[in-house]
Image (tube, rainbow, N blue to C red):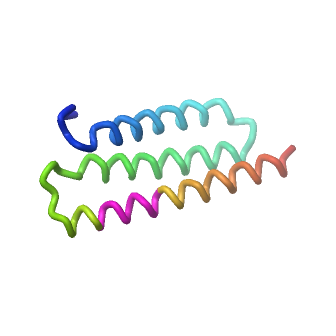
Amino acid sequence: MNTAHPRFFQRLQTLGAVLFVAGLTTHTGRYQSLFTAGILLTLVLLIRLSIELSIGEREPEQTLERKMKQLSFLNQFSMLIAMFGVVGFMREQ
């Protein structure tokens, strides 16, 4: 990764989130809802990381705007997945 890239810290943050969620998912195998939500969140974060890595330094405005909308949608979708995972976990208790 290029440390001089303007979105370097967002890329690093997304990579850290992928590793964190994947690590937590491996420890929640006993709870089906948390395990499923963790797998889905890991997949969404990997998609987000691929979009982050595809953003160039001199990205045209239209392309950058489209990718930012995709990232916003993925953020909202991941919050929805996390919410359903927590609600399912509470129901399992």
Report x, y in % for residue 46. 41, 46
Tell me which residue sits at (31%, 53%) in the image.
51
Position of 35 relative to 20 (above/below): below
Image coordinates of residue 50 in percent, x first then y, are 32, 49
**In the shown orientation, is residue 59 left or right of residue 43?**
left
Q: In which quarter of the image is the N terminus?
A: top left
Q: x, y percentage for residue 79?
A: 58, 55
What span is in magenta?
Answer: 66-74
Left or right, 87 with reference to 41: right
Number of callouts: 0
Residue drawn where x is 47% and y is 49% of the image: 43
**Looking at the image, which residue is at 40% across and 37% down?**
13
Which secondary structure type mostly characterizes the magenta part of the structure?
Answer: helix
Q: Nearer the viewer, residue 45 or 66?
A: 66
Q: Residue furthest left?
A: 58
User: Would you say residue 67 sits in the magenta stretch?
Assistant: yes
Asked whether, in this view, residue 89 is left or right of residue 28, the answer is: right
Q: Is residue 13 magenta?
A: no
Seen in the picture, residue 78 relative to 70 is either above or below; the reply is above
Q: Measured from the top left, where is residue 23 in percent x and y?
A: 55, 30
At 21% across and 69% down in the image, what residue appears?
Answer: 62
Quarter of the C terminus within the rendering? top right
The answer to whether residue 93 is above or below residue 1 is below
The part of the image, by quadrant, that contains residue 2 is top left
